[in-house]
Each structure stands twice: as structure tokens, then as C-alpha cells.
Image (cartoon, rainbow, N blue to C red):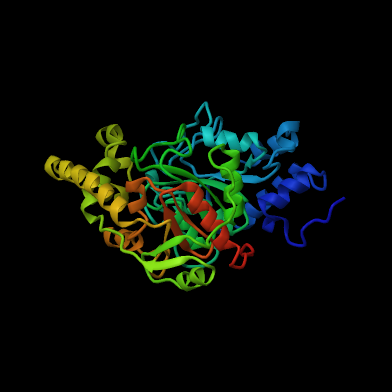
Amino acid sequence: MSTLPDAPLHDWSCFEIAAAVRDGDISAEEVTAHHLARIEERSDLNAFITVCADEAMADARNLPEHRRTGPFAGVPFAPKDIFDTAGIRTTVGSEHFRTRVPQSTALAVQRLVDAGAIIVGKTNLSEFAWGVTTQNAHYGYTQNPRHPGKIAGGSSGGAASALAGGLAAIALGTDTGGSIRIPSAACEIAGYKGSWGLISDDGCYPMIHGMDHVGPMARSMEECALALEVLGVLERPTPQLAGLRVGVLHPTPAAAKMAALGAHVEDAVLPDYGQLVPLFAAQAADNPRDLITDRWDEFSPDLQAKLTLGLNISAHDYLQAERDLEAYHHQCELELNHDILINPTIPCDLPPVDEPETFELRLKMTPYTRAFNHLGWPSCTTRDGLMISGRDDTTVLAAALAWEATIPGRAVTS
């Protein structure tokens, strides 16, 4: 028998859980039962839309050999409820799909399951993944376990809350304008949005083609790196900060610390992307167009307002924004010639959980995040809320791993 972590089971890392299951020190069934009890104990967080208790216990009880010995053996897994899961409903946080049960599972979800992960539930999100707060009118507001009374961020807020609260150890989110990075910062966990197309979005409800990114979320960047390896998209690089040219987009204490670690740090300016708002709004309103036509009343007033904004974009403004996007890409390629760029993911105080999500609030929360969806560049958030972005996935992940090695870990919130 190996020595098990001296911490509650819901505070164990993915590495610790999987090693204990592989070694026979604990069963996947015990791990799953503990986390399901934890989900019930912290139901106040409203992190899940659907809890898969029976399915999870049956899966853990009958875990086949290749999964029991896999890198995520027995690890409780919480996919955002935007990913299809065979036999388990996928609502996309909407009333429209409240009873929808897919027949197949999203590719990224299936790869983590094949590696041993056990789905314990589908996490809450902003309706149709459009939002920064996870204030869902149909399934309730998600609470922040780290900062009670504050938002959990969005749109992958349920996943972030579940991880910070010890309800799961690995999650998958999506990010179209910051929806992995914002909740990761709000709940003080780690989230990785790779370059566009790095992780397959097969089986994931689309918001904006060309801006949607799938990515792992966990309590550390090391665990996100493991997920990226299992997903078959990126090998864990050697951590590195020394020698990198770092552009600082917004004042952060991390800049001086990175300089002390051997990075070449200088101020940088992110070109303004406000002219691209019409493109984002119009494209986000396009995917559910059939539902807008036939089932408008089933959208919440909040989403109706967002959709109306997009539907009212003129053809002239849309075409101009498309031209502006091409110019924006060119400008960023010329001006942001750094290895990595850093800034606080959320450069403002977290709003109260019941503060209305206005257009102004979304702009306030996303002055840096959305740019890297437009660009398709990799961008991640470390568990202290620092956002690290760049052009190359390996460089960004290496810097994030090196940075997290310099900051203390965080236990879950009891």
C-alpha cells in the first residue's frame, strides 16, 4: 500500500486520485461515491444542471481494465452542459433543450472518459454559453465557493465552481470570448484555451464558428497539461520563463516576479477590438436562428436582449467588422511580437452574484479575453488569476507551468 494524501478525498489532485486507483489503494467506486456526496453537500453552489449519480456509480463499479489503469483512472469529471453525452441530457443551459438526450458523446469528452475519467454531472452555464456570470434564468445562478456572494464567472461558471468546491477534479469548458478564463480567475482555478481548433469541438453546441475553443479546467495547470496530453493535442513542455520576452498588457505584480525569474519584461498595448463587437453579436445570434423564429418566448429576457443586439446589426456594419477583423489580425501580428503576453484575467472587482449582466458589465469583464478568440491564439488562466497568452501553444503552456510552480496551491473550499 502506498501513502495516500493527508487531505480529504475531494481535495486530491487528478494525479493523486488516478495513482491511488491504479495501485488499488482506493476504488473508483469509493472516489465516485465520495464526490457525489460532496455534490449533494454543496448543492448550494448550483454548479450542476444534471447530476449523473446512478450512471456514475455504475460506470465506476464496472470500470474496465484499460480505464482503471488510465491517466485519469477514477477521476470525477464534470463536462460543461454544452457537450453531448450519450444517454445523459445536454441542455446548453436552455429551456429549448431541457429534455434533449444525445445518442453520441462529444469527442473531447469521450477521450477523457476512455482515459478513465467518470462523468459525475453536467455543469451549469450561461444560457447558450453567452455570458460572463453564469446567471441562468432556467437553472439558477451558480455560486462562487471561493468568494461567497460573488459571481462564479461565465459562461463555464458551473465547471469552475465544481472544481473549486471539490465536486470534481477535472472539467471541460468552452471559450468564445473568455468563458474558460473568466470563471477560472473568478474561482481561482486553472483553465487552458488553446489555439483555435487545437481541441475538437465535435459534439459541442456551436456559438460562433471560428471563435469557439474547447479546453480543460482543473485546480492546477499541471492537471490541464495532463488533459491536453490525453486529448492527444499537446505534449507537456518543460516549464520555462527565463529568456522569454514578456509583454505586460495591464499592470500586475507578476511582471516584476517574472523579470526576477529571468524573463525580459516590457509594457505592451493590446490593440482595441471594440470595432469587432458587431461581428461577435451578429454571429452569436445566427446559430439559434431557427429557435429565434419558432420559439422566441423560451429564451430568457437576458438572452433575448443579447440576441436582439445581434439581430439588429446592419449588413453594412457586419461587413465592415469583417474587414476590421482582417486588419486587426495584421495589426496584432506586427505589434504583439512577444513570446507571451500577461495581464489580470479580470481587471476589476468581481460583481455580486445578483448584479444584472449588462452589456457594460460584459465589456468591463472582457477587455483582454475576447481578443485572443478573434485572433485564435492560445490563452490561459493560472490559479492566481493571471492570464498568459501568445502565438504558440507550447510556449504559452510552458510559461504557465513555470509560473504556477512559483505560487502556492489552493485547497478546495470547505
Q: Residue at x 47, y 32 (%)?
A: 203
Residue 182 seen in this snapshot: no
Residue 331's spot in the image, x, y percent?
25, 52
Relative to the observer, which residue lies in front, 24 or 292?
A: 24
390 w.r.t. 70: above or below: below
Left or right of 166 on screen, residue 366: left
Write the residue at 27% across / 62% down.
Answer: 360
> Residue 97 occupies which quadrant of the picture?
top left
Residue displayed at 30% across by 42% down: 284
Closest to the observer, 341 or 360: 341
x, y percent for residue 221:
57, 55
Residue, far top: 103
**Is 34 placed left or right of 159 in the picture?**
right
In this view, the residue farthest toward the left is 316
Q: Horizontally, is 13 left or right of 357 in the view?
A: right
Residue 333 can be seen in this image: yes
Q: Is residue 137 above or below residue 360?
A: above
Residue 70 lies, with reference to residue 6, above or below; the image says above
Residue 352: x and y, percent? 41, 67
Residue lying furthest front in this view?
Answer: 243
Q: Nearer the viewer, residue 299 or 280?
A: 280
Question: Which of 124 and 108 lies nearest the eye of the viewer?
Answer: 108
At 39% from the left and 71% from the top, the residue drawn is: 251
Residue 375 versus residue 403 in the image, above or below: above
The image quadrant of residue 42 is bottom right
Image spot of residue 237 (x, y percent): 58, 49
Give the quadrant of the C terminus. Answer: bottom right
